[in-house]
Image: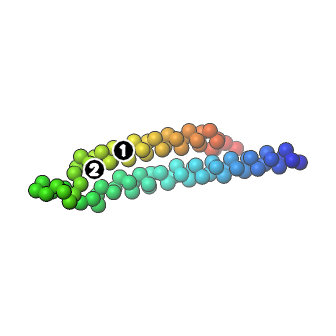
Amino acid sequence: MGADTNEKLTRDANAARTQRLTDAALVLPFVGIVLILIPVIWPAADAVDPAPGTSTSTALIYLFLVWLGLIGFAAILANLIKKFGAGRG
């Protein structure tokens, strides 16, 4: 009975882990949209006085880093989901 119970607990833990990973993968596009839209609310730098605003180059660097981060996080999630067997019976 002990081995059967341990096996069931392991299976339940893997199912819960897989569900959390799947939920994270489903939320990732919405997080990406929010992160990509953040530069829209930044004040733009003025040609006369660039101090109070954010330059376009800074915003583009931010967007590129967010894009790379989303790709990296999606790759990590995909590998973890594959490792724990999401979609398997």
Sooner in the amino-acid sequence: mark 2 or mark 1: 2
Residue that numbered label 1 is attached to: 65
| Callout 2–callout 1 Cβ contact below 8 Å | no
Q: Secondary structure at mark 2?
A: helix
Nearer the observer, 69 or 32: 69
47 shown above or below 77 = below
Q: Position of residue 87 (x, y in %)?
A: 63, 44
Q: Disc 2 to disc 1, how far (Cα)?
A: 10 Å
Q: Amino acid at mark 1?
A: Leu
Q: Secondary structure at mark 1?
A: helix
Q: Is residue 88 left or right of residue 79?
A: right
Q: Quadrant of residue 89?
A: top right
40 shown above or below 57 = below
Q: In the image, which disc is placed on residue 54?
A: none
For image coordinates 84% across by 46% down, the residue present is: 4
Furthest toward the left, the residue is: 48
Residue that numbered label 2 is attached to: 59
Q: Amino acid at mark 2?
A: Ala
Q: Position of residue 85 (x, y in %)?
A: 64, 41
Furthest toward the right, the residue is: 1
| Number of residues whose C-alpha sits closer than 10 Å to that of mark 2, classed few (under 14), some (14–19) or many (20 or more) | some
For image coordinates 62% across by 38% down, the residue present is: 83
60 shown above or below 44 = above
Q: Position of residue 48 (x, y in %)?
A: 10, 56
